[in-house]
Amino acid sequence: MDTLVSKRTGKNVDIQCLRAVAIIFVMLQHYRNRLPTPPLYHKLFDFVTPWTGVDLFFAISGFLVCKTLIEHLGREPRASAFANFWRRRCARLLPALIFWAVASIAVGALVGTPALQGAWDAAKGALAGIFGVANLYWTYCAQHGVSHCVQADYNSHFWSLALEWQLYILLALLVAFFRLRTAMALFAAVALIASCFPAQSFSYIWALRPQAFFLGALIFVVVQAHPDLLVGPVVQNRWFKRSLLFVGLLMTFCAPNHLKEPYVIPTVGIGAAIALFSTLSVGLKYPACVSRVLEWIGERSYSIYLCHFSVIFCLRKLAAGIPGFENLSPVWTFLPSALAVICLSFVAADFSYRKIELPMIKRFSSKKKPESVDGRPHLSDNAAG
């Protein structure tokens, strides 16, 4: 499989770049109305829906988590395979999540009025995130008015992390009790049933959506069973892959603006899966400077996701203390505010990535190369991020 692989990390550069696209769009969504937002910025939302960046993350997670789980089962006794899978997942994700959950409580105390109330509001969201129920908590809050739960949503973005954990559990349980094909058929049934219901923002159907994650996992299972799907002359054509990526991203980010329920989330999931598939064989080869920047962002996308809300709330508190800032036009305050969010989020995320994520990744990374499952070759580790 001809894949563009980072010499530094040994990871698929295109998947890292796709992660970067996902986090950039998520930040576009979360910046809106929380800091100075000019009319042109609002106009952007008439054409694209940036919150669907999380579905790109879901598709990538479905692919990589299914890959990791199946590889553990292929080389270890069943009980130790599941134990090691969960140990590595927890070590990979929980330390950074706990760190930024605690940081959000400090931010709540800093910006809340009064400070104790801000800390308590952030603590409730932090605990919901750590215990993997934030999607249910914030959906309840949204449906009853957020002020019913908190004064400010310091860490409402943890909802998508909770959904990922729930989907990890679902996938692991299905694989534990059924053969792989049966497990994927049952997962498909869950995704199809979920696709039959309207999914307005922060309805329970919206907050529990499995489609993109399932399709990511399905792509791994199919390609692992039929690796020739990635070596045909058409699939190996770089321009075909670029077109596939463009179509996938177009579907992902534009579907909510142009489709009615219940077709939005299924279409977004399909678009995310198409974009993911475009990264699995021939390297898309972005211009070198673009590729390096996107790869850097993609590597830190998890920490960026965790920390950027705290950065936004701190900057909003700082801006409120500048005399006359609130009276300035958003046109003049947008650029410095946006640059501050980007710079501070990236600095904080780089610290989190280097000091929390990387040490845990290195500590729990497997030194054994994966063996085959049912006599079939695995996708290379280099195919994954």
Image (spheres, rainbow, N blue to C red):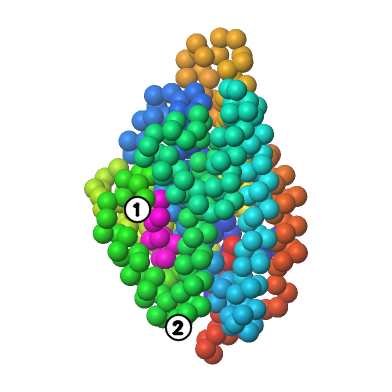
What x and y, as percent, mark residue 3?
Answer: 56, 68
Q: Which of marks 2 and 1 is nearer the N terminus?
A: 2
- CA gap, disc 2 to disc 1? 27 Å
The quarter of the image holding the C terminus is bottom right
Q: Specify the quadrant that holds the N terminus.
A: bottom right
Q: Position of residue 335 (x, y in %)?
A: 54, 25
* Left or right for 116, reference 250: right
Question: Which disc, if any, is residue 351?
Answer: none
The magenta-colored residue range is 205-215
The amino acid marked with disc number 1 is: Ile
Q: What residue is at 47 percent from the left and 19 percent from the top?
A: 330
Q: Does the magenta stretch include residue 274?
A: no
**Amino acid type of disc 2?**
Arg
Q: Can residue 293 be seen in this view?
A: no
Q: Is the magenta stretch mostly helix, strand or loop?
A: helix
Could you say whether the residue bearing mark 1 is in a helix, strand or loop?
A: helix
Q: In this view, does 367 lie above or below 50?
A: below
Q: Is residue 123 left or right of residue 47?
A: right
Q: To which quarter of the image does residue 69 belong?
A: bottom right
Q: Mark 2 points at which residue?
A: 179
Q: Does the magenta stretch include residue 212?
A: yes
Q: Is residue 243 above or below residue 119?
A: below
x and y percentages locating residue 82 in the rendered image: 60, 75
Name the residue tied to disc 1: 205
Q: Residue furthest bottom?
A: 375
